Amino acid sequence: MRKSREEAAETRERIVDTAAHEFGQHGIAETGLADVMAAVGLTHGGFYKHFDPKDSLSRKPSKRVWTRNGSAWKRLRVMKP
């Protein structure tokens, strides 16, 4: 059964969010594609419906982590006495 574009986009976001978490916990070099997909609850083969090579997956979560951390650093600077 085919997913709607909206469902596919939601799944892609779940993969990116989970990858960001896994990369943050274990590092990019130590996190395999199978690890990310297992954490999402999808098959390893399902990845290729949403992404091309692993490097495209590693860029999005990494950017997301940097964005989150950047926001946290900005808040800490504002709170500094």
Image (cartoon, rainbow, N blue to C red):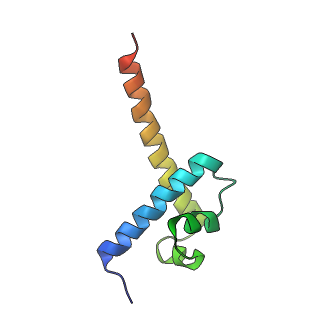
Where residue 41 appears, x then y in whole percent? 52, 70
Residue positioned 42% across, 67% down in the render: 12
Residue positioned 65% across, 57% down in the render: 31
| Quadrant where the C terminus is found in the figure | top left
- As displayed, is residue 13 above or below residue 48? above
Residue positioned 48% across, 45% down in the render: 65
Q: Residue furthest top?
A: 81
On screen, residue 33 versus residue 17, left or right, reads: right
Where residue 39 appears, x then y in whole percent? 55, 63
Q: How many marks?
A: 0
On screen, residue 69 versus residue 22, left or right, reads: left
Where residue 46 appears, x then y in whole percent? 52, 77
Q: Nearer the viewer, residue 49 or 56?
A: 49
On screen, residue 4 versus residue 76, left or right, reads: left
Where residue 50 appears, x then y in whole percent? 46, 72
- As displayed, is residue 19 above or below residue 74? below
- As displayed, is residue 43 above or below residue 33? below
Q: Residue furthest bottom?
A: 1
Q: Nearer the viewer, residue 63 or 32?
A: 32
Residue positioned 39% across, 27% down in the render: 74
| Quadrant where the N terminus is found in the figure | bottom left
